[in-house]
Image: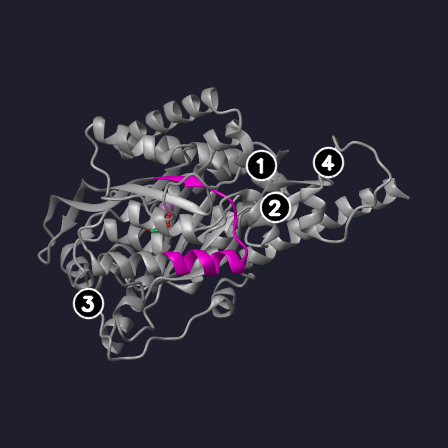
Amino acid sequence: MVPTWQLRAAFARRLSAMYGTEVPAYTTLLDVAGQVNDEVAARDPDAGRLGALSRVTAERHGAIRVGTPGELRQAAQIFAAFGMHPVGFYDLRDGEEGAVPVVSTAFRPTCEEELDRNPFRVFTSLLTTSDRRFFDAGLASRVEAFLARRRLFPPELLALAERAEQTGGLPEPQAERLLTLAVAAFALSPEPVDRAWYTELERISAVAADIGGVTTTHINHLTPRVLDIDALYRRMGERGITMIDRIQGPPRWEGPDVLLRQTSFRALAEPRRFRAADGAVTVGSLRVRFGEVEARGIALTRAGRARYDHLMAETDRRMALSPGADRQAVARDLWRQGFPATEHQLAVAHQAFFTYRPATDRPRDDRRPPADLAGLLTQGWLTAHPVVYEDFLPRSAAGIFRSNLTGDGTRDADLVGDPFDAHRLSEAIGRPVLDPFALCARRQDHSLRQALFTLQASAA
Ligand code: OOG
Ligand code: NI
């Protein structure tokens, strides 16, 4: 029996191998990321604090986009076979960095043990044809009719995935078959693209065309994790690969790394076959697939996240006042004034998530443990271990989408959008969309209860 986590690790590995043959710059990105990670591991004794090097080296996230709730349900079934469940709700339709007609979630493992084994995630977006700001009723029904005729996933794949989910894995040779079919379902299709239809949807948004203009889906990027994203950014430039103009997310600073920093290279023109109205097939090109890299930090609580969002908004405000300023420097100054400077401060201010363990090196005396977290930490009763941020940032995601959009698209801001939230997305998927804050809080609370229990037991 091949257990779920081995299926997931193999799925990530094979998608990565496939993407490397499809998008050569991705292979350069992996080389550079690997070098940077080895260098950081060699110079920094704390390099493993946010994940063992073996995990970080294998770590990837990908992204796909689908057109209908039915397709999303099927994608969810396939990911469930790999122990990946929907976490978090992202609405990218109102982004300041460019509006995209999708709502999204990320399929990923949810418990610590599974994340450590292999944390593969797939950011998955659903086209919102019901949003009248993007699609009028006539176009929406033509898109829906087009989508209703296509089949993204073969029935054999869905049946194998259902079995793998139910039995916690699959025996060989079914495991092999599941992997082959799953990877093939996310490869770029050689099917000719209907030129007129694609172009019509491109006027709404390049993302609408990428989803509803073709008869298949595909991985549109695959992202390795790197321990020093600034070093990687410089080195990619030296290798002649132009990255977008900045690293998104929090600035580099001397305080703790939190949340997620990401950067990408622009979508590459790839040859694609097109079918004209008269049926003639010609070769043209499309820019839909790109490369991205990320550095992960500590997960923030809702309070910490509010602080982060506030500092980002303040950075925007200052940049609007002096557009020539260096965004990194502006952000860094704000962070120095307004963000907890150490992990300890983050923990006692309840701004980030940690797991807690009883300290093993506290000298024995007859004091009893204090009742508050700050006291337990400063007096050395407990040690705090950061919880890694496993999710995404809507604003960076919008920036990533944007980096491979050809035009701004059109959105009628005078109309009202179609309200969408995690609950409605759960119903569309037919599985609960989990709350990332709740997952982290549960992990933190569980560790704290255990630690306090152990302390009390040994003090008694
Ligand atoms: C997904 C973009 C979001 C990220 O890392 O924020 C994303 C897409 O382009 O389909 O992957
Ligand atoms: Ni991404």
Q: Any atom of ligand 1 within 8 Å of the CB at mark 3? A: no
Secondary structure under badge 3? loop
Mark 4–mark 3 Cα distance, whole angstroms, equals 57 Å
Percent x, y for residue 230? 33, 35
Q: What residue appears at the point 32 percent right and 73 percent down from the top-left corner?
A: 131
In the figure, is residue 136 to the left or right of 59?
A: left
| Disc 1 residue type (three-letter) | Asp
Badge 2 vs badge 4, beta-carbon distance below 8 Å: no
Return the mark for residue 410: 3
Closer to the camera, 64 or 254?
254
Label disc, if present, on residue 354 of the rendered structure = 2
* Mark whose residue sits in front, 4 or 3: 4
Q: Of callouts 4 and 1, which one flags the residue occurring earlier in the amino acid sequence?
A: 1
- Judging depth in this view, the residue of 319 and 193 nearest the camera is 319
- Hey, which quadrant is residue 221 in on the image? top left
* Location of residue 209 by image quarter: bottom left
Q: In which quarter of the image is the N terminus?
A: top right
Badge 3 amino acid = Thr
- Nearer mark to the viewer, of 1 and 2: 2
Amino acid tagged 4: Ala
**Residue 116, numbered circle:** 1
